[in-house]
Image (tube, grey):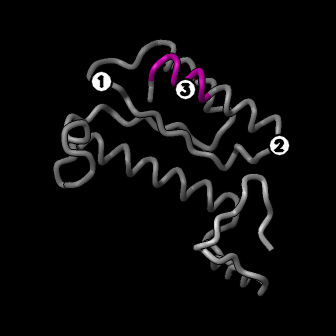
Amino acid sequence: MATGPGVAALQTAIKAASAEGLPLQRAVVVLSSPGEGRIPAAVKAAATMLQSLVAAVVTVPCDPHIRTHGLADPDRLGRRTKEAAERAVAAVLAAAHRTWGDPLPPAPIPAALPAGPTQDPAQPVSEGGLTT
């Protein structure tokens, strides 16, 4: 949520992820506006700071239809909301293309789980206990 405390929490998370060496240049940050009107100055400043750390920062305007109806009926979304969503999707795709190329490679096929003992779902596991 694009509020002062929300953006402060996001900045903390970004700094922690950066300290862990995670690839922030692939991340896209989407800030959702909490209400009608201008974005608070603190949020604008934070978004500007984040732009140098992540692939993109996209702001989604407040949409009263989301607040009242959720995403149950996407046809009710406002034009500005749809445009912001398109920008977010384009930013994610651009970050993926910068990382893995265009066209994107096929997704890897997950490895099968190794065969092993199974836990009977009717048998509870003791707290802190391991299943065998």
Which residue is tagged 2? Answer: 21
- Find residue 35 and name its label: 1
- The quarter of the picture where residue 103 lies is bottom right
Disc 3/disc 2 C-alpha distance (Å): 21 Å
Q: Secondary structure at mark 2?
A: loop
The residue positioned 46% from the left and 48% from the top of the image is 88
48 or 35: nearer the viewer: 35
Q: Is residue 103 above or below residue 87?
A: below
Between 74 and 127, the one nearer to me in the picture: 127
Q: The disc labelled 1 sits on which kind of residue?
A: Gly
Residue 129 shown in magenta:
no
* Outermost residue, top side: 41
Sequence-wise, which precedes: disc 3 or disc 1? 1
Left or right for 122, reference 117: left
Query: Which amino acid type is marked by label 2?
Result: Gly
Task: Tell me the number on the disc at residue 47.
Answer: 3
**Quadrant of the rendered structure where residue 37 is?**
top left
In the image, residue 66 above or below residue 94: above
